[in-house]
Image: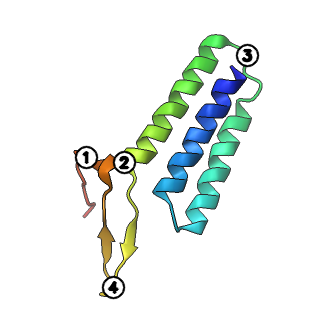
């Protein structure tokens, strides 16, 4: 299952690189958090638990890819959100 874990880890990193492109702090912090989570579970041997962790990693990369959109500061001092095609159909709720 080691190969599956590496693929899942890389998928999470790819998702964060896309979601946080251009944001050095978030790229660094999200990569560190992903590594921490995978390292915490490095010694898990139960096949059922490993499967559950892999599914959580797949869900995390899917969530990051489809639900996280970074707002960028525009020239008027406001923030703009430009959802990509992966975000199509998602509902954007802006907190009040």
Q: Residues within 10 Å of mark 2 (few under 14, many from 20)?
A: some
Which residue corresponds to mark 4?
77
Q: Position of residue 78 (x, y in %)?
A: 31, 80
Q: Please give the label number shown on residue 67.
A: 2
- For marks 2 and 1, the one nearer the N-term is 2
Q: Residues within 10 Å of mark 1 (few under 14, many from 20)?
A: few
Tell me the element at label 3: loop
Tell me the element at label 2: helix
Q: Quadrant of residue 46?
A: top right
Tell me the element at label 4: loop
Relative side of 50 to 57, left or right: right
Residue at 39% x, 72% y: name it: 72
Q: Quadrant of the N terminus?
A: top right
Q: Position of residue 33 (x, y in %)?
A: 63, 48
Look at the picture and state if 61 lies above or below 20: above
Residue at 50% x, 60% y: name it: 20
Q: Position of residue 23 (x, y in %)?
A: 53, 67
Q: Position of residue 82 (x, y in %)?
A: 31, 64
- For marks 4 and 2, the one nearer the N-term is 2
Q: Quadrant of residue 96?
A: bottom left
Tell me the element at label 1: loop
Q: CA distance from mark 4 to mark 1?
A: 26 Å
Which residue corresponds to mark 3?
45
Tag 2 and tag 1, C-beta contact below 8 Å: yes
Seen as rendered, the residue at the extreme top is 47
Q: Nearer the viewer, residue 20 or 44?
A: 20
Q: Nearer the viewer, mark 1 or mark 3?
A: 1
Q: Residues within 10 Å of mark 3 (few under 14, many from 20)?
A: few
Q: CA distance from mark 3 to mark 2?
A: 31 Å
Q: CA distance from mark 4 to mark 2?
A: 24 Å
Which residue corresponds to mark 1?
90
């Amino acid at each position: 299952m080691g190969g599956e874990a590496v693929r899942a880890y890389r998928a999470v990193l790819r998702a964060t690189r896309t979601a946080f492109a251009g944001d050095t702090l978030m790229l660094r912090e999200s990569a560190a958090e992903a590594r921490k989570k995978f390292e915490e579970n490095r010694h898990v041997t139960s096949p059922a638990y490993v499967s559950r962790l892999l599914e959580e990693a797949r869900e995390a990369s899917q969530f990051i890819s489809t639900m996280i959109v970074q707002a960028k500061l525009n020239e008027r001092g406001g923030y703009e959100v430009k959802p990509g095609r992966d975000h199509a159909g998602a509902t954007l709720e802006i907190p009040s």
